[in-house]
Image (spheres, helix red, strand yellow):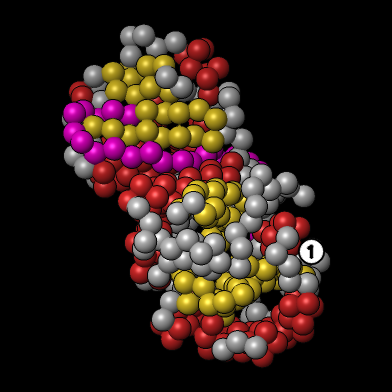
Amino acid sequence: MATFEQALPAGFRWSAVQAGIKASGRSDLALAVTEEPAAAAAMFTSNQVKAAPLQVDAEHLRASGGYVRAVLVNAGNANCATGEQGLAAARESCAALGRTVGIAPHQVFPSSTGIIGVPLPVEKLIATLPAAVAGLSSGAEAAEAFATAIMTTDTRMKVAQAEVAIGGKPVRIFGCCKGAGMIGPQLVPHATMLVYLFTDLAAQPAELKAMLAPSVEASFNSISVDGDTSTNDTVLLLASGASGAAYGSASQEEQQAFRDALGTVCGKLAHAIIDDGEGVTHVVTLQIKGATDDAAAKRIAKSIAHSPLCKTAWSSADPNWGRIVAAAGYAGVQFDPADVSVHIGGLPVFERGTRSAAMDEAAVHQKMLQREFEIAVSLGSGPGKCQFLTCDLTVEYVHINADYST
């Protein structure tokens, strides 16, 4: 169990139980319940194939006006591409939890993660709800149990915290997530990454929505393990209001401090996902600058991050700068190769359209042997820039995903 460095946000209780959905027999049902209706903001995958719970989530947020009383997560089954049966299962689980807790079904936010195309054994889920509700607690052990139960191929729990003062009152943020493979999030406002952010700030759904989007863009929308955008990607931000500190009446400085804290939590969780990526041995930060705009810079970053040739070179610390330049060149962004420079681990490898005269292959190789290193690509003098977090591609990743469904 991890030790939380700060107190958890007030107004929430968590639990986890074994529902028998995961083949491993480990805890696979996570539950979070709020003492009062919590303001919510959510962002979902842009994949056109969306899992049943995401469709139900959108319906429920509309019906509740953006408020949530419970989060119900199952791991081991994505409940995706399961047709009307899948939608019925998601709705049935929400209704069952509503009866158990004494809330309306549309106040429940369901999530699922795991294999696609297999019917969700909703009867197993429903059978364990009384135990999950009975085990609810506001303590650290319960929060850790929640964060652990949502994992699939993750090797470790992923949590982050922050605390700020608003009006002299402490406001706390606790975030947890899961994700190790099928990570190439493209979240929009309207193997999988699930992120749950809890705060005791008092805020309106519209206020949460406005602050969540930029935090997600700089974090979860700027990472990639394999470039595959999941059918289940979800980020949910809940504000219980239990701190008594209202965002709307806070000073501009206090509001900015909270937004910064939220961004920090999202950034730590995003890094944890890449660091725990399936088979990952190197975490690579891409720094792109000099593009015509930020969108162009991100497009080039994604092209490099998703290149199997680049990623396999990184796995063996091979300073093959040609693959990086080639991936940038086919990204569909206009630039003059004569203006491009590439540095790996701070060392020059490519300048003015050719190999750098100062390149020391052995020294670059040593930099790339580190667990984490940076690749900086300068395209010229444009204002566009992007920081993007990715990783290498190893034989272990192939083994994990070759046998995932069997």
Going 75% across and 75% down the picture, which residue do you hit? 132
Q: Is residue 48 above or below residue 317?
A: below
Residue closest to the far front: 168
Query: Callout 1: 10 Å neighbours few (<14), some, many (20+)?
Result: some
Q: From the viewer's perspective, is residue 10 above or below residue 21?
A: above
Above or below residue 103? Residue 395 is above
The residue labelled by disc 1 is 26
Q: Quadrant of residue 404?
A: bottom right
The quarter of the picture where the C terminus appears is: bottom right
Residue 176 is a magenta residue:
no
Instruction: From the viewer's perspective, tell me whether residue 206 is left or right of residue 393.
Output: left
Question: Which residue is at 59% across, 41% downward?
Answer: 275
Q: Position of residue 122 (x, y in %)?
A: 68, 83
Is residue 300 at least partly visible in the picture? no
In the picture provided, is 149 more to the left or to the right than 377?
A: right
Residue 404 sits inside the magenta stretch: yes
Q: Residue 44: give x, y in percent of width and height.
A: 44, 67
Taking 341 as reference, is 230 left or right?
right
Task: Name the residue rendered at 67%, 84% in the picture.
Answer: 101
- Report the amino acid beneath label 1: Arg
Q: Nearer the viewer, residue 131 or 73?
A: 131
Specify start and end residues of the magenta stretch as a single range.
377-406
Visible in this render: residue 357?
Answer: yes
- Residue 240 percent location from the top left of the image: 53, 68
Residue at image position (78%, 72%) is 135
Above/below status of 316 relative to 189: above
